[in-house]
Amino acid sequence: MSDERTLDLLEAKIQELRELNKVEGLDLSAEITKLEKKLAKMRTELYANLADWERVRIARNTKRPYALDYIAEIFSGFYELHGDRMSGDDRALLTGLSELDGEKVAVIAQQKGRDPAENKERYFGMVRPQGYRKAIRMMRLAERFGFPIISLIDTPGAYPGLESEENNIGGAIAASINSMIEVSVPTIAVIIGEGGSGGAVAIGAADRLLMLENAICSVISPEGAAAILGKSKERVKEAAAALKLTAPDLLDLGVIDEVIPEPLGGAHKDLQQTASALKESIIRNLGELSQASTDSLLASRFERYRNVGRYSILSG
Amino acid sequence: MSDERTLDLLEAKIQELRELNKVEGLDLSAEITKLEKKLAKMRTELYANLADWERVRIARNTKRPYALDYIAEIFSGFYELHGDRMSGDDRALLTGLSELDGEKVAVIAQQKGRDPAENKERYFGMVRPQGYRKAIRMMRLAERFGFPIISLIDTPGAYPGLESEENNIGGAIAASINSMIEVSVPTIAVIIGEGGSGGAVAIGAADRLLMLENAICSVISPEGAAAILGKSKERVKEAAAALKLTAPDLLDLGVIDEVIPEPLGGAHKDLQQTASALKESIIRNLGELSQASTDSLLASRFERYRNVGRYSILSG
Amino acid sequence: MPIFKDKQYFRVNLEKEADEALWLRCKSCGELVFKRRVRENNNICPNCGEYFFLTARERVESLIDEETFEDVSKPIVADDPLGFQDEKPYPQRLEEAQEKTGLPSAIILASAKIEQMPVVLGVMEFQFIGGSMGSVMGEQICHGMEEAIRRRCAFILVSSSGGARMQEGAFALLQMVKTTAVRARLAEERLPFISVMTYPTTGGVQASIASLGDIIIAEKGAMIGFAGRRVIKETIAEELPKNFQTDTFAIEHGMIDRVVKREDLRSELATVLRFFQEGRDE
Amino acid sequence: MPIFKDKQYFRVNLEKEADEALWLRCKSCGELVFKRRVRENNNICPNCGEYFFLTARERVESLIDEETFEDVSKPIVADDPLGFQDEKPYPQRLEEAQEKTGLPSAIILASAKIEQMPVVLGVMEFQFIGGSMGSVMGEQICHGMEEAIRRRCAFILVSSSGGARMQEGAFALLQMVKTTAVRARLAEERLPFISVMTYPTTGGVQASIASLGDIIIAEKGAMIGFAGRRVIKETIAEELPKNFQTDTFAIEHGMIDRVVKREDLRSELATVLRFFQEGRDE
Ligand SMILES: [Zn+2]
Ligand SMILES: [Zn+2]
């Protein structure tokens, strides 16, 4: 079975043919159409059968659109607000004000880097305590002014390091979850790439939890899970499957509310199309949430999380 | 005019005479009584005429009782609660739960060190951002459980250093003032030693502001004020007088509510007596505050601070 | 625990099984010590003071007033919503943990008294799949807090957990939110939540409910932190300080209120409870 | 300002006095530059981009829509409650500052519009005793916030201050509390407070009202911090980083939201105001 790289090569060839086709007297249209169809078919095959591990790879693909890419497509302007007012400005978690479909919103977004320099700055999207404390500040600001909160999740997890532990990363995540629970405005969280464990949950405890089709969300990375068992590549794939970390799986399990479709091959194949589906979903969900009074919004949120989990009742 | 050291020497001599007096057949009682009277008179003269600068010296006297000394005398138990839940545990600002006259209270107290090691640990009573953030946490806890807040102020000021600025000491003070203003339980602040500028105000914005007789409170240290002008010793004393930083001055100005008397020579001459006066004052003030509903408590607090200041209205 | 083997509804009680061995050898000082004396001494070596591991039952016993134990847990056991299998299927792993610990899940939930003061008390059992938090533990913690609200008393949670339970995937992760949501209700009711962190309190448990105590007490020797040492070393080659993620590290970095010796924990809890017990207008 | 010399009640207006000199020499690039061009360019050197000092009047002018200025300050001037004297009596110092700046106090308080949006705007004048906050400034800031509440608009405070005014002692110190108390009212009313920090925003101003903005914007080149460099060096012999207490230091350490060039400040404020202006249910 062909892999993504092969398909990309084929696509490039087709593009070359298209260029050639512009030369007068040379008509390759029929051949090009055939090739295009073939490519489309191969792509469908490849991605329709995507194993969970492949989804992990797509979710982590460095070509995949990141939060700022969607923000640029979906929102009108992003007025970034920096800093936790206490000690730092985490570049892996951005906060700001923006406008969506004419409505003012507060945005909390995890952001990975595109190149080594940016990844150094953004810690590969791994959030430190300062990031979660900035998020909490944003939640309070949003609450004060009645801005709904949109949070875009894309992190391998909270940053595991000495500095993080010294600044009580666990306590910061707990406080962030607590703020998400208490904030009296509508909240929508979208997992756009990686939803890595506690680092994702911290800003994911929303009224609606949406997921892009190829995003993943897991309590532990497949590598981490595999490491507990053994370390072979196969085990990583097994773990990826066992963890039920894909969007369709999580929808089946009732953990998320909606899967937002991506183009074949993943969001990076067509940012506009993905962003447009994402935008539609956010607006629709926000519209529904905005109907509710604050009291019923908070009551529904409580019910949602009070009841999450699966267990069996023992017969007495 | 004799200084404190001379008087201490005389007192020691009298004590020696008292010991000698125990020897059978030797009756020095009359002489001792005379000397005692003389000492008392000299002490009265010395301290009754205390210049402002001498008050500064008493307020900073390393024999002066510190917060923990009063806490041990006044409260039944002090259950210290550590840490700001974010990055550190400032040892110059302590927080805890305690009991005063049968009522549970929250205590926030600035604490200096007695010896070099303790002073290193406590930064000579200079509070860092972590200290003010711990204070804020305590205020929230007190509010949740309805504990009145007693804050004991004794600091040369917030700690001026790189680490402090990196952790936004100014922002932490501002946030602490804000919490003091918003907290919905009765609050009493007592300046027991040095009330140094913003570092004191941070936990001083209370419903009642009390001061020990020889405590000081100033926007700038006399040394700092003198430095602006020149650096001679005389200038420091002048500055101390000009700044109106003593308890009687501040009572005259209407800035504080009450001066708590100290024994002649200062609180260190009789901890029990000072503590007992302090205790009486706190209990009485707390009793008055406890009469009010939360709404009227907050309204009075607002009025108090809304109206603080002195200015002239221009004729139109 | 024969009832349990039938997977019938059962209640935890604190009656001890007969101890076969009379003596055990302390790993720390190497001395042979009389097992009963160790038990009576909170599992602390009477010779060198080393803390032996406390089971959840033993922990409960060490904290509460005699004969005040009442199991108030919900009669529930874990599901296998993911159909999770690693070297063995999750249901088998659960069964083995149940056999080993005699508990239906990784937490005991009790109503009891501490120095005559009523509490609802949750205690995690580390030997039950690393004390990991899955749907059952999350539900029991919430149920415990709601029980505390009904009884107008404090809720105490003694954590001993490696974090979220991998085998329950996203459901485990969301217990962080669930417990936080109910914890907010307890706060609204102005009832105290005392979090006790013991060895180890890490991962998703430290990053949610355990860090949200009104008062957070760590047992001496506790390990407290979010990420595991291994993960940190793999992610970033950093030299970690000697006391990394210990009780002293936690107190120095402002994460907890107090560090308390095991032998003092009961009286410490009583002290805290008294602050919230009396003189309140509820 | 003849009215002022009589200590009569007066209002600030933005009409400029005639400029005697046509040219000035830029201290940064050494070029002679046409003074009017500098003025029209927000006091930025048209040759090298160096920021010259902006007076409070010039600052107001640079930010608001033309002909929307209305002085809304209270007709008050400073008292001398301490009878303070150093090399000169405080009243004399005040008078000299008033002469020098043409202002009754260290703050201008105006109602105005920024890109058509109404605001109440306070701007500190550093040349008036170091922009220090005494009773008058505290009262004007509070009055400004209350005026914003009455007008249902945003409050903007442009800080340029060395801190609390020594000459007013404890009264100055308590302005930190006073402004914070009224700021809480503004928050209850859900009206935005935008704090703009310029060179310098330090001491008691930075440690109170200026740090309590919903949004905190620093002008490029601002100095932001609590303790002065001298005090820090005297207290502890510490090597201070090059960018200590600069705008970049403040943003790196999470103290502020944004750093904005002087020439962009007006449009930046408009952007912020628009977020709070429209689409709200007030
Ligand atoms: Zn031993
Ligand atoms: Zn120039």
Image (cartoon, coloured by chain):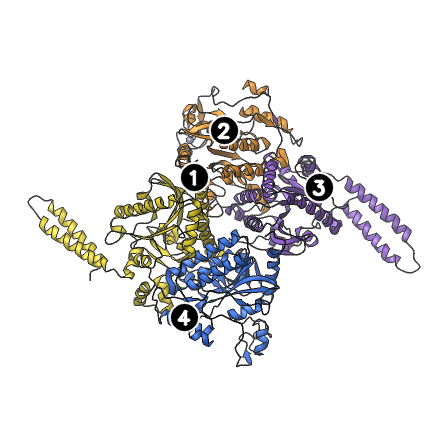
Chain colours: A purple, B yellow, C orange, D blue
Q: Nearer the viewer, residue A182 or A261?
A: A182
Q: Could you classify mark 3 by the number of other residues whose Cα lies within 10 Å: few (under 14), some (14-19), or many (20 or more)?
A: many
**Residue C116 seen in this snapshot:** yes
Give amino acid for label 1. Val
Q: Are marks 4 and 3 in contact (CB under 8 Å)?
A: no
Q: Could you classify mark 2 by the number of other residues whose Cα lies within 10 Å: few (under 14), some (14-19), or many (20 or more)?
A: many
Residue C9 position, x and y percent, is: 57, 21
Q: Which residue is mark 2?
A: C56
* Subunit under mark 3: A
Residue A48 position, x and y percent, is: 78, 40
Q: Which residue is mark 4?
A: D94
Q: Nearer the viewer, residue B26 or B304?
A: B304
Q: Mark 1: which secondary structure? A: strand
Q: Could you classify mark 4 by the number of other residues whose Cα lies within 10 Å: few (under 14), some (14-19), or many (20 or more)?
A: many
Residue D21 position, x and y percent, is: 53, 81
Q: Mark 3: which secondary structure? A: strand
User: Mark 2 vs mark 4: same chain?
Assistant: no
Q: Are marks 1 and 3 in contact (CB under 8 Å)?
A: no
Give amino acid for label 4. Leu
**Is the N terminus of chain A in the top left, top right, bottom left or bottom right quadrant?**
top right
Q: Is residue B112 left or right of residue A48?
A: left
Q: Which residue is mark 3?
A: A259
Q: Is residue C136 above or below residue D60?
A: above
Q: Nearer the viewer, mark 4 or mark 3?
A: 4
